Image (cartoon, rainbow, N blue to C red):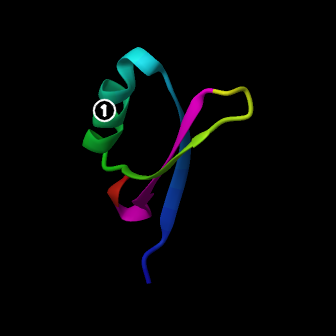
Amino acid sequence: MTAWEYATVPLIDHVTKQILDQWGEDGWELVQVVTGPTGGLVAYMKRSKGEA
């Protein structure tokens, strides 16, 4: 069974692609983007624990 680790990442409007690209290069997969409690966007990321 795969074990997962998760991260929440605040997204800044003018550098969203760069932020997601960097996390992707580190092995993280985007699961969902939601509006955070203060109105900004937050990305939920996951990767298997073996990729760390």
Q: Is residue 33 shown above or below 15?
A: below
Residue 26, position as x, y percentages in the image: 31, 42
Say which residue appears at 28% left-offset and 35% top-offset: 21
Residues shaded magenta: 40-50
Residue shown at the point (37%, 49%) measured from the top left:
28
- Tell me the kind of residue under disc 1: Gln
Residue at figure coordinates x 35%, y 38% from the top left: 23
Q: Position of residue 46 (x, y in %)?
A: 45, 56
Q: Give whichever of 52, 31 is nearer the camera.
A: 31
Residue 11 drawn above or below residue 52: above
Quadrant into which the N terminus falls: bottom left
Residue with the mark numbered 1: 22
Residue 18 in the image, given as x and y percentages of width and height: 30, 25
Return the residue nearer the eye: 33 or 3. Answer: 33
Image spot of residue 2 (x, y percent) = 43, 76
Above/below status of 49 relative to 13: below
As for residue 41 lying within the magenta part, the answer is yes
